[in-house]
């Protein structure tokens, strides 16, 4: 990194610049390391994590003086467990920062991280941006959900050639700010929620953007296709969560690589066994959070992991396929299912249906397709969608169509493709 880029990174990360820069260099040095080298680092980090966990009442009871040899020997940690044991799960002797989850699956969780863990998360994010072709001096438009940033913060971002705007504008003035920022500020990249960036495709007179970075929610195939077409852009996905922070980033070959020296990621089947090359629940261990150890935390996502070598040269385990949240599937007769990603693959070639959302009643299995498109072509494409679902789920499945001006989002601004209701 030359002096110019160090200067811009310092502007953007003033208070923790030295730590972020130190971690960023270390991440870069290890990015193409051998599996053995990565395993050695992970072993040392797990040892430190156990020492930290032993300082919390919750993990003390589970470890109970045993010489635990591997992460897989621990029970899975769920959101319900965290809510029930919130005061027992963190070490009050550490210096920490707090964050909260979105609360879409219940009461929001309060997350505590030691400050070094927080700077590591930022360093991993900057590493991903570097791999996407960006630099600290690059002009980036961040679309943040419900963000509140001080005047001092906005000045700092402008000095760093960055802009932050609301991902989900609630009035015409906020919409005009985004359009103006794109057309006059001319960013090299837009980074933010998938739903927020997708909402830009409804507007006219927006210039093309070279790079789109999606964060915060699942990026489906049809959404990627829509963004690539509208902006004539490369689209890259960054996988993380409020609880863990940085988990994986998309390499130049289009695969999500696990940040293995920061997190341990497993997929477990219905028997609770860790598996590769087959679908399972995503379970994550944060190797750097010594304030509130997340060990084998059930994230709520489903995925397929693979250890197959990647053409990019990185040796880390990668996400072969993200399958969305545990509840993101439609149910049919005789146990048939259609995952959200299957729907996405089918939807990516549709041009006229607009935004889509599939709402299924759990008791009756009735499906309502909410859509925003109009016209004869839209009607024809919706008929194809109905036929696809009846072939996949059973001809007796009742499917209704419901036109809406826009698809309702969650309280955090996310747009769910599949919604289950009672």
Image (spheres, rainbow, N blue to C red):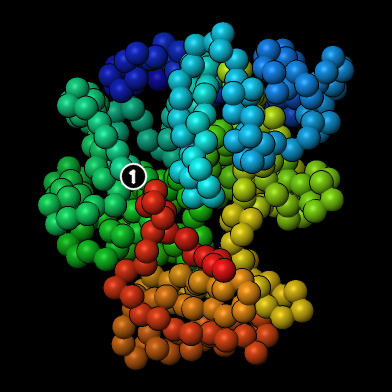
Relative placement, left or right, of 403 versus 305 is left
Q: Is residue 168 above or below residue 37?
A: below
Q: Residue at x 28, y 19 (%)?
A: 11
Residue 65 percent across, percent down from the top left: 84, 14
Per the image, label 1 sits on a secondary structure element best described as loop
Q: Which corner quadrant of the image does residue 158 belong to?
A: top left
Relative placement, left or right, of 180 versus 199 is left
Residue 50 percent across, percent down from the top left: 73, 17
In the rendered image, the quadrant that contains the N terminus is top left
Relative placement, left or right, of 62 versus 374 is right
Q: Residue at x 62, y 48 (%)?
A: 300
Residue 32 percent across, percent down from the top left: 63, 29
Q: Is residue 274 visible?
A: yes
Dot 1 alpha-carbon crowd within 10 angstroms: few under 14, some 14 to 19, many 20 or more: some
Q: Circle 1 is placed at which residue position?
A: 145
Q: Which corner quadrant of the image does residue 298 belong to?
A: top right
């Amino acid at each position: 990194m030359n002096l110019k880029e160090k200067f811009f990174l310092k502007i953007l990360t003033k208070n923790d610049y030295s730590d972020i820069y130190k971690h960023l260099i270390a991440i870069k040095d290890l990015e193409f390391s051998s599996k053995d080298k990565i395993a050695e680092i992970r072993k040392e980090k797990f040892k430190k994590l156990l020492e930290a966990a032993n300082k919390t009442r919750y993990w003390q009871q589970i470890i109970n003086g045993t010489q635990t040899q591997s992460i897989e020997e621990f029970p899975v940690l769920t959101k319900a467990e965290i809510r029930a044991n919130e005061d027992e799960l963190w070490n009050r002797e550490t210096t920490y920062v707090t964050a909260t989850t979105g609360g879409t699956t219940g009461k929001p969780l309060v997350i505590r991280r030691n400050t070094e863990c927080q700077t590591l998360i930022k360093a991993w994010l900057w590493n991903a941006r570097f791999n996407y072709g960006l630099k600290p001096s690059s002009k980036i438009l961040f679309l943040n959900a419900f963000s509140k940033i001080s005047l001092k913060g906005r000045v700092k971002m402008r000095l760093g050639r960055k802009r932050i705007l609301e991902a989900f504008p609630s009035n015409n003035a906020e919409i005009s700010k985004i359009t103006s920022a794109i057309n006059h500020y001319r960013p090299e990249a837009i980074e933010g929620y998938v739903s927020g960036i997708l909402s830009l495709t409804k507007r006219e007179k927006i210039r093309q953007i070279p790079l789109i970075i999606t964060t915060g929610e699942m990026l489906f195939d049809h959404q990627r296709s829509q963004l690539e077409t509208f902006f004539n852009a490369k689209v890259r996905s960054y996988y993380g969560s409020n609880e863990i922070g940085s988990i994986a980033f998309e390499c130049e070959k289009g695969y999500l690589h696990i940040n293995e020296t920061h997190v341990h990621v497993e997929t477990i089947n219905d028997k609770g066994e860790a598996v590769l090359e087959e679908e399972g629940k995503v379970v994550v261990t944060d190797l750097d959070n010594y304030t509130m150890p997340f060990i084998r935390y059930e994230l709520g996502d489903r995925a397929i992991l693979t250890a197959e070598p990647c053409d990019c040269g990185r040796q880390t385990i990668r996400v072969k396929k993200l399958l969305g949240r545990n509840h993101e599937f439609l149910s049919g007769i005789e146990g048939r299912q259609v995952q959200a990603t299957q729907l996405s693959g089918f939807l990516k070639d549709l041009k006229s249906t607009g935004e889509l959302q599939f709402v299924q009643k759990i008791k009756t299995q009735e499906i309502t397709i909410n859509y925003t498109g109009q016209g004869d072509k839209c009607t024809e494409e919706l008929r194809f969608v109905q036929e696809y679902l009846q072939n996949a789920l059973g001809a007796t499945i009742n499917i209704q169509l419901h036109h809406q001006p826009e698809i309702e989002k969650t309280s955090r601004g996310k747009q769910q493709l599949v919604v289950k209701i009672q």
